[in-house]
Amino acid sequence: MRAILSVFVICFLLSCQSQKSVIKPNVATLNTQPKLVVGVVVDQMRYDYLTRFYNKYGEGGFRRLMSQGFNCKNNHFNYVPTYTGPGHASIFSGTTPKTHGIISNNWYDKVSDSYVYCAGDTTVQSVGTTNKAGQMSPHRLKTTSFADENRLFTQMRGKTIGISVKDRGAILPAGHTANAAYWFHGADEGRFITSTYYLETLPSWVKAFNDTGAAESYLKEWNTLYDINTYTESGSDLNAFEGGFKGKETATFPYDLKALSKTNRGYDIIKATPYGNSIVADFAIAALDGEQLGQDNITDVLTVSFSSTDYVGHNFGVNSKEVEDTYIRLDKDIERLLNALDAKVGKGNYTLFLSSDHGAVEVPSYLESVKVPSGYFNNDAFKKTLNETIISNYKAESFIKNISNNQVFLDREVIKGYGLNLIEVQQALVDVIIGYPQVYKAYTASSMTNAEFSRGVEHLLQNGFNQKRSGDVLYVLDPAVISYSKTGSTHGSALNYDTHVPLLFFGKAINTGSTLQHTTIPDIAPTMSALLGISFPNGASGKPLEFVLEN
């Protein structure tokens, strides 16, 4: 009997010990969460900017992220259109416009028969300015971001702060529950602002930053950081493919920003130079102290969008000296941000990822000069042709309400009034559009709704198609054909120059290494959610990247 009792006691003790050993790892796992997650988006950053300018970067910025973090070299957007609003929304929500609803920066709203802006909100008021530039919120974003899920998980104790020179670059990443989002209002003010969606007044640290005259300090000469003759990774400084600034005859270095600001919307000129990124880095570093981010064991989220790269790319083109200098200088700003995180949050206490909202095409007029197929699409001529075709074929007034974002919106009431079948009209327009010069493909809304595309451009179109917000007909232009000026670069397509963007992970709980495995933008938010042990964003369609995270 004693022997049996002894065995029982031993088994009981072993069971208790086993339970304890199960509990301990769970506690340890919770303690491995970073104090701060930093999500960095570099607007209009092609993947090859990491490699093309690599030898010009220092050891503390991009190269530190690449060597000490994890580099996903084959990372792509899996939808179109590849614009800023959808890009930021997709990175942080873990899904595509099909689900989160941000189908473009601006789009035609079928209900109100008007254009709407992705972050525009007339129900809120500006804070920090009397200008309407502050009437913004995330109300058009239909899903949560991983920052929202972190706020919910921590009972709103984990903070979220969004920062950018662009309102949409600050607002959409931070999500619906953010403590605040701040963006730069230029014109004659040069200050960071927000809206009453978040706050009734600017915090004292923001007021103090604005009072330092930081914006004024960046109205100075912009010249190349290094000898321009060493900028061998880009084209000639003087060429026919760049826009430039009003008041300066040529798009060539140097640029006197103080003088040029008078004819280029005042402080707004800063946005279109590397100094727009510098002031965002300044403000983000100030936010670390001002908001006490990462100072306890409850994870905070800081989103930082460097948007001046986009303004410079649009103006000067992806092969310009200006773009090269902008990235060399951004590398320095990222180094400053990392050093501040090391000092204020602590090495090993934060996790950071860096990606982009889209890439950009080489200037088509430049491509034409080197015999690469490319061109420019005339929207007005296209619309005129479609209207004339409708009048001729149907003996009816035009029932096109809007053409935008490579989509055709039809007046369904007029079509119904003529006794026509909507689906047949959609298909008839596709048949006309596919024969139009410089059009690659065209599809009806009906096909996007009823068919299932698993690959190719069709798959990307479907991921970008939102049944309530998108048009009746979608069309795709030929490679490197754009609707834009003949100077500067743009984006929006399903081609690799727009979809292939960097994805770097760095810091706490992140493996060191790289992969050529195909990853997609919606994978980022689930990966961050898995790291934090929180719910995935409610519409997430991406998957956690297990090889990025330490076991």
Image: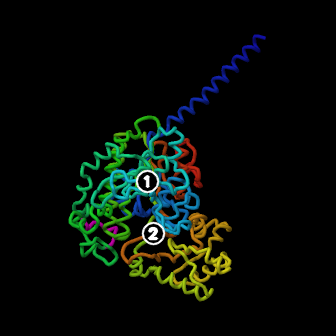
Q: Is residue 346 left or right of residue 32?
A: left
- Lower sequence index among marks 1 and 2: 1
What is the crowding at mark 2: few (fewer than 14 residues within 10 Å), some, or many (at least 20)? many
Residue span colored magenta: 227-235
**Corner quadrant of residue 217:** bottom left
- Residue 475: x %, y % from top left: 56, 75
Question: What whole-number distance in Å separates the C-alpha atoms at marks 1 and 2?
Answer: 31 Å
Question: 372 or 210, which is in the foreground?
Answer: 210
Q: Is residue 59 visible?
A: no
Magenta includes 229?
yes
- Residue 394: x %, y % from top left: 63, 86
Q: Is residue 154 left or right of residue 324?
A: right
Q: Is residue 286 left or right of residue 43?
A: left
**Corner quadrant of residue 363:** bottom left
Q: Which amino acid lies under the numbered mark 1 shown in the image of this protein?
A: Val
The quarter in which the C terminus is drawn is top right
- Residue 397: x %, y % from top left: 57, 83
Q: Compared with residue 206, is residue 157 higher up or lower down, i.e. above or below?
A: above
Q: Is residue 381 visible?
A: yes
Q: Compared with residue 321, is residue 9 higher up or lower down, i.e. above or below?
A: above
Q: For mark 2, what is the residue?
A: 491
**Corner quadrant of residue 321:** bottom left
Q: Compared with residue 382, is residue 179 higher up or lower down, i.e. above or below?
A: above
Q: For mark 1, what is the residue?
A: 124
The quarter in which the N terminus is drawn is top right
Q: Which amino acid lies under the numbered mark 2 shown in the image of this protein?
A: His
Q: Determine the residue positioned at 54% across, 83% down.
A: 387
Question: 126 or 229, which is in the foreground?
Answer: 126
